[in-house]
Image: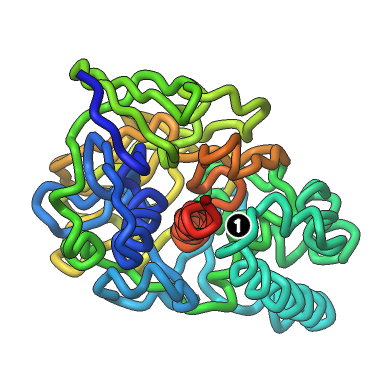
Amino acid sequence: MVTSHETVIVGGGIAGLACARRLHDRHHPFLLITESVGGRIRRSTDGTANLGAYYVRADYTHVNQFVDRGRRIRRRDILRGVGTGSFSRTDLPLVMHIPETVRFLRLMSEFRRHYSSFQRDCEHTSQQVVIEASSYLRDLYREPASEFIARHGIKTIARTYLAPAIHGTGFTGVDGLTAFSLLVAVLPTVIPMFEYTFRPDVLMDGFERHMSVDSVTSIARTNDGYSIQTRSGAIHAARNVVVATPTGVSVKLLDLGPVKQPISAHMFLVRGTLLPPWAKTLVTLFPPGETTFGIARQVDGSTVFCSASENPDFGKYFAVWTVVEHMAWAPAFHLVGDALLTCEQGPGLFVVGDHNVCTLEDAYITGLYAANRILDRRVGAP
């Protein structure tokens, strides 16, 4: 039996929920099909820590409406690995290289202005169109980050601040990133960031009954829309489909063409006694070349430990320890490369998420864009 819907949203991560929230607020009918709510926002089983997307920035206009913000993570709270086994949390490099610091801050200021306009525009225009329409954004999206760093003479800042920030939170080195991805990733150096607790009850308020717990296995074009089949055997017909799954899943459901390369990571919740110097700071970000990405001490005394390995040597960091929970993200996201996906893949067919810009807020905005296009399409229908 086929059930018909005006719109089907596939995936209940932040982008899919954003689309559902906007459609619900505009009284547009939809069905949300998802295996779980939150996607890569994943809270530990005991509710004490995030084992997925770890922080929000102060400028997350949309996402911050649906989280409870926790501790602010300040620069002085971060121990940075600067290579050769040494770590620092002083701002001495900024003082010793004032011309370079000034150049970096000017670059970030200029980028923030363009990026804020980009986010506003993307609520009603696809990311691809907005980026390609701006010579500034288009050039950043195509330029390798390493070339951008060399061209602007910020190598010391990149080595002491940007490289550990990218490796510790993006699980990769600077090589392979575009200048655009680099600048987005290091915005927390100039914009406050906070730990948080996601509030799906607030985001989903009023449309919980429009959700089906299932997994979509195929999407096919029909004469008047799309046919969606699920693992449970259900078949849904829809005029509009919004695919809000991780990039790798979206590739399996649709012919997307080139996408950015995947990055994997393992998140652990550990209880135990940290060794110095890790015990004396809130967050440690490790430099490229290390298999450990980051360590974050929690309010209750536990530790979030992020690694490239599923079997890290905890003895290097803890005197005693017990692994409470392990979350394998394979992949965590797609970040390496300069592939630029279009959101609207066909009439009424949208792909949303963090495939172009890897933040919670930008993923949310893609969901808003898809919803706005669907609402515009309904208004314009004969």
In this view, the residue farthest toward the front is 382
For residue 26, side relative to residue 362 (left or right): left
Q: Is residue 170 above or below residue 70?
A: above
Q: Residue at x 44, y 32 (%)?
A: 331
Foreground residue, 194 or 62? 62
Judging from the image, the colouring scheme is rainbow
Q: Residue at x 17, y 40 (%)?
A: 325
For residue 297, side relative to residue 55 (left or right): left
Q: Residue at x 39, y 23 (%)?
A: 227
In this view, the residue farthest toward the left is 46
* Percent of width and height locating residue 243: 44, 38
Quick check: can you spot residue 76?
no
Return the residue at label 1.
82
* Percent of width and height locating residue 340: 69, 42
Foreground residue, 203 or 100? 203
Q: Quadrant of the N terminus?
A: top left
* Percent of width and height locating residue 181: 66, 53
Q: Is residue 329 above or below residue 195?
A: above
Q: Residue at x 68, y 47 (%)?
A: 174
